[in-house]
Image: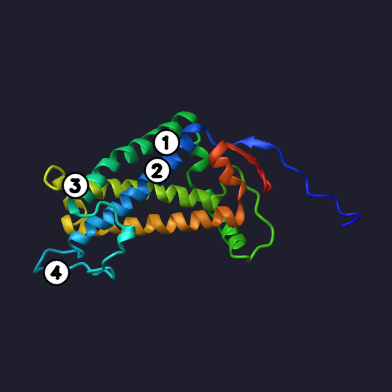
């Protein structure tokens, strides 16, 4: 439109170290295998509770998930996949955590009480209750909340998985989660939280900030929103 200056072009900035990008994509692929093999394992006994005893309530009782969503073909095959994929998943998590600690990037990623107002402002923006995008740094406060929560969820997934994998060796851990069947229950529900997080994450990337997808591939990002850095 005549007389209206074009929006300023923001420069490319380097956003993601190769370790961050590598562990991000490895986690995505391996987690997909863990989830699908876990659904196949669930098929072997699709209830949470001992046979003939009380059951933990679940809307998924006796659910048979589609064949395309399950990896392993049968119980033993699914267990082999699940345990094999466990190691690269944990390795990627430790590598990522080590990088955050060594680089100090965890300070810009971890959610703190002072981020609460900013998270509320971002939520209002996403819900279209606020017109302008709040200023942000590398991660906005709502992203910090999501990423901090998913890290804690990952720790929960590992601990409940260990309590199921080795209920005798880690009897204290299994007891901490309320017993074997209760640990299965909590481990199973972490799957759906991870799935929900992934879906929301992907939708927001492409709907709100598509350049961030390229940044996770190449490391470079052309800023789109105002920053307070």
Query: Circle 4 sits in a helix, a strand or a loop, which is it?
Result: loop
Residue displayed at 32% across by 53% down: 35
Q: Which mark is drawn over residue 54?
A: 4
Identify the residue under disc 2: 27
Crowd rating for badge 3 (residues with CA inside 10 Å; few <14, some 14–19, many 20+): some
Instruction: Using the rendered view, name the quadrant where residue 99 is placed.
Output: top left
Q: CA distance from mark 1 to mark 4?
A: 41 Å
Residue 118 image position (x, y, % from top left): 58, 53
What is the distance, in whole Å, between disc 1 and disc 2 at their CAs?
10 Å
Q: Residue at x 33, y 58 (%)?
A: 69
Q: Is residue 155 visible?
A: yes
Q: Distance from label 4 to label 2 (Cα)?
A: 36 Å
Q: Position of residue 2 (x, y in %)?
A: 90, 56
Quadrant in the picture for the C terminus = top right
Task: From the image, state whether disc 1 or disc 2 is nearer to you.
Answer: 2
Q: Which mark is residue 96?
A: 1
Image: 6 above or below 63: above
Q: Disc 3 and disc 4: Cα gap in Å?
A: 22 Å
- Given contact means CB atoms under 8 Å apart, are the residues at marks 3 and 4 in contact? no
Looking at the image, residue 94 sits to the left or right of residue 60; the answer is right
Q: What residue sits 49% from the left and 58% below the top?
A: 200
Q: Secondary structure at mark 3?
A: helix
Q: Secondary structure at mark 2?
A: helix
């Amino acid at each position: 439109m005549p007389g209206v200056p074009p929006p300023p072009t923001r420069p490319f900035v380097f956003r993601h170290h190769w370790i961050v990008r590598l562990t991000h994509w490895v986690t995505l692929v391996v987690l997909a295998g863990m989830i699908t093999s876990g659904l196949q394992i669930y098929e072997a006994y699709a209830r949470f509770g001992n046979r003939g005893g009380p059951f933990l309530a679940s809307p998924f009782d006796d659910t048979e998930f589609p064949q395309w969503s399950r990896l392993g073909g049968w119980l033993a095959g699914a267990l082999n996949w699940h345990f094999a994929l466990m190691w690269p998943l944990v390795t990627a998590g430790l590598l990522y955590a080590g990088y955050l600690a060594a680089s100090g990037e965890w300070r810009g990623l971890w959610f703190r009480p002072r981020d609460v107002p900013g998270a509320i402002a971002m939520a209002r923006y996403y819900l279209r209750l606020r017109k302008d995008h709040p200023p942000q740094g590398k991660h906005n406060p709502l992203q910090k909340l999501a990423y901090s929560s998913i890290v804690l969820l990952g720790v929960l997934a590992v601990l409940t998985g260990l309590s199921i994998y080795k209920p005798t060796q880690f009897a204290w851990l299994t007891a901490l989660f309320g017993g074997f069947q209760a640990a299965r229950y909590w481990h199973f529900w972490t799957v759906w939280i991870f799935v929900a997080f992934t879906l929301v994450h992907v939708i927001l990337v492409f709907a709100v900030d598509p350049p961030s997808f390229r940044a996770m591939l190449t490391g470079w990002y052309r800023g789109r929103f105002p920053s307070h850095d």
